[in-house]
Image (spheres, rainbow, N blue to C red):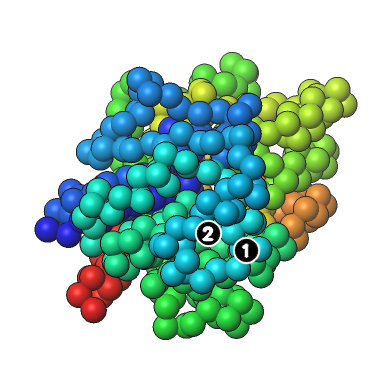
Amino acid sequence: MNHILYFPTRYFPAISGAEFYLQSIAEIMKSKYNFTVDVYTSTAIDFKGLRHVEGKIINSGDRHYDRINNLNISRYPIDYNINIDEKLQAIKNLSSYKELQLSDECLIEFLKNGPYLDSLIEKIKLPTNFSLDLIHTTFFPYFNLLIALMLGKIVNKPTVCTPFFHFSNPRYHNKHLVEALKKFDRIIACTALEKKVLTKKLGISESRIKVISMGVNFKKFDQSTELIKNEFRFKRKYFKPNEKDYKMVLFCGYKNFEKGAISILKTIPNILKKFPQVYFVFIGPSTIAFNRELSKLRKIIEPRIVNLTPDNLKGYYDPKKLAAFKETDIFLMPSRSDAYGIAYLEAWASGKPVIGANIGATPEVIRNNLDGLLVEFNNYEDIANKVVTLLKNEHLSNKMGQEGKKKVQESLSWFDVAKKTHQVYMELIHN
């Protein structure tokens, strides 16, 4: 029986595409392929928690701390009071780190990003604690990637990384951080474009990279299934009684500039001038910048905005979220920081058209004018025009939504992703 260690930067109840991806794969590997599965991760819940004590963390005894669905979770506390010079020397003295032959600049950059898991580093000094066949980690550029590489050296087993490399964001191209990616036995890229960047621009061997797209639980989002009598109704809950027939535009993701959430807020006045009968729904972790912009917007106009955070949800398949996807007219996420964009798949599974930014890997995911529309990143006028186009053209919206639905139904389930990932594992384990 093969024994796999999954090592994401964070884990549920932390919510983002990278965590959800590895959780989905891990659960299928145990249930379908009968693997022994361990999950190591930090205690961070939000991104701030990776580096700052003021961030949100999960504590021992909290719900979901050490078991989620069919998997046991080992969470390691984060050391926030680290002295970079002191930790630099401590890590450099480890034989498993020396074998990686990374520069001091590389180690320093990863130490700055966190999360520094002191208790886990102490644990891996004792190799008798581990009996593994493969280690799979995510996501770039956080310190858990270096720990995964060190552990791979200790047990002399292959390492796999799904970096979710946001190549349209300049900070990901730091040459010192990229050093670590070159040390993995296999890298899983989400798109052919991501692979091209990793090989042509960053110099990673093409033979080490496998392209595997993201997935979706089609049945959860497919609205063609007859709705049960008492299923949650999003518009009934959040729209005014006399406005339940208004259109709806949905964003689901981290509410920051990179994901396009700030751009949407700044675009709303332009949209309302051309199409006033519309609600805007935001689901996902909030940010100071988003809250500030939302407050400014509400002083100018009184837009119809529903703003939900993970605190309002019970998980990836919360009834409110499922209902939002089923009842929305458009899914809008004009992001520049997605290696793929799982939320696009969720929208398509719901039969809805999507709008994304014409940057990074998104043009490979969204077929422009077929299953969605592409806009210029952070271009308020372009975003507004494309949103209004779909709001006013129900036939076009439905056609794009059905095209996307057909695409995900045919080949983009989590079981499809797991099958291809399993093949990667077998090649490495039996090589």
Sort mark 1 into few (<14), some (14-19) or many (20+) by Cα contacts within 10 Å: few
Amino acid of disc 2: Lys
Which label belongs to residue 104?
1
Tell which of 51 and 313 is nearer to you: 51
Above or below: residue 94 compared with residue 67: below
Distance between the alpha carbons at the discs numbered 2 and 1: 8 Å
Quadrant location, the C terminus: bottom left
x, y (%) of residue 199? Answer: 55, 80
Q: Can you tell which of label 2 and label 1 is closer to the viewer?
A: 2
Tell which of 172 and 106 is nearer to you: 106
Which label belongs to residue 92?
2
- The answer, for residue 196, to whether it is visible in the render is no
Amino acid of disc 1: Asp
Q: Could you tell me if the residues under marks 2 and 1 are in contact, i.e. CB atoms within 8 Å?
A: yes
x, y (%) of residue 242? Answer: 62, 18
- The residue at 35%/45% (across/down) is 123
Q: Is residue 364 left or right of residue 76?
A: right
x, y (%) of residue 251? Answer: 60, 41
- The residue at 64%/56% (across/down) is 109
x, y (%) of residue 33? Answer: 17, 57
The number of numbered badges drawn on the structure is: 2
- The answer, for residue 83, to whether it is visible in the render is yes
Q: Is residue 398 left or right of residue 135?
A: right
